[in-house]
């Protein structure tokens, strides 16, 4: 049995706690729908949690390891940026928080690392609608750069999402991809699910 564990915030959670257990109604459920017909020995566990930051993931790392996952996906960071932007922090304080994020992210990967375990990282994202979120985009870019460096150093897959999701919103209509500038519609979740599916299948068959 191969266990795939999905970690993240509300974008991963997507109703799995209160409305649609156990996989939620977002990209994790869509990933199951795409992969389960191809593999009888696959188990997917969604441990996304609404409101989580990287430090909260780190606090729960022992419970994640107890599940003995073979593959872990991580989509985290936008709540960390929300704390920077919505709490009247100075530019210097925001930079300190960004560096603390990078340290916690790196420690999380240290804790989760195993030679027998595949870890897939994903880029946090924001949409420029409502307009106030445009101020967040430079911080998403900075955070993405920090994660990318970590991914390269550790030779881990890193799925870029910011530009592709924003381009899809422009191509179709923002309301077709995002519900509020942070969370996704079914079509937005589908984009993530397809990217994950392709990497997982490539790694398992390669």
Image (cartoon, rainbow, N blue to C red):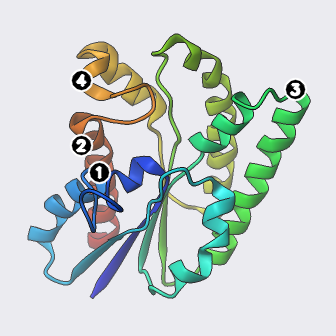
Of marks 2 and 3, which one's residue comes earlier in the chain? 3
Q: Please state the horizontal and vertical placement of residue 30, each as a whole percent of the image.
A: 21, 54
Q: Please state the horizontal and vertical placement of residue 98, each as a whole percent of the image.
A: 77, 42
Q: Please state the horizontal and vertical placement of residue 190, each as a whole percent of the image.
A: 24, 43
Decide if residue 200 is on the left or right side of residue 131.
left
Q: Residue furthest left?
A: 37
Foreground: disc 4 or disc 3: 3
Residue at mark 4? 176
The kind of secondary structure element at disc 4 is: helix
- Tell me the CA gap for discs 2 and 3: 37 Å
Q: Are marks 1 and 2 in contact (CB under 8 Å)?
A: yes
- Tell me the CA gap for discs 1 and 2: 6 Å
Of marks 4 and 3, which one's residue comes earlier in the chain? 3
Q: Residue furthest right?
A: 92
Q: Please state the horizontal and vertical placement of residue 91, each as a whole percent of the image.
A: 86, 25
Residue at mark 2? 190
Q: Which mark is residue 27?
A: 1
Decide if residue 55 is on the left or right side of residue 199.
right
Q: Are marks 4 and 3 in contact (CB under 8 Å)?
A: no
Residue 172: image quadrant is: top left
Residue at mark 3? 90
Q: Residue furthest top?
A: 131
Give the residue drawn at x 23%, y 78%: 42
Q: Is residue 32 visible?
A: yes
Give the residue drawn at x 73%, y 34%: 84
**Quarter of the figure with the N terminus:** bottom left
Of marks 4 and 2, which one's residue comes earlier in the chain? 4
Q: Are marks 4 and 2 in contact (CB under 8 Å)?
A: no
The kind of secondary structure element at disc 1 is: helix
- Tell me the CA gap for discs 4 and 2: 12 Å
């Amino acid at each position: 049995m191969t266990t795939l564990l999905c970690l993240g915030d509300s974008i991963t959670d997507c109703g799995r706690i209160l409305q649609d257990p156990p996989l939620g109604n977002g990209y994790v459920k869509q990933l199951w729908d795409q992969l389960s017909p191809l593999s009888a020995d696959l188990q997917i566990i969604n441990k996304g949690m609404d409101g989580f930051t990287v430090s909260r993931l780190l606090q729960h790392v022992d419970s994640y390891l107890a599940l003995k996952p073979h593959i872990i996906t991580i989509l985290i960071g936008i709540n960390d940026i929300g704390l920077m932007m919505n709490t009247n922090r100075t530019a210097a304080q925001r930079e300190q928080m960004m560096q603390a994020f990078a340290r916690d992210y790196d420690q999380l990967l240290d804790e989760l690392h195993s030679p027998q375990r595949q870890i897939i990282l994903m880029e946090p994202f924001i949409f420029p609608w409502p307009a106030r979120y445009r101020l967040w985009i430079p911080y998403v870019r900075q955070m993405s750069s920090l994660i990318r460096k970590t991914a390269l150093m550790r030779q881990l897959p890193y799925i870029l999402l910011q530009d592709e999701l924003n381009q899809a919103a422009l191509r179709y209509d923002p309301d077709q991809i995002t519900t509020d500038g942070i969370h996704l519609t079914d079509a937005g979740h589908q984009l993530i699910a397809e990217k994950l599916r392709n990497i997982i299948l490539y790694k398992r068959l390669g």
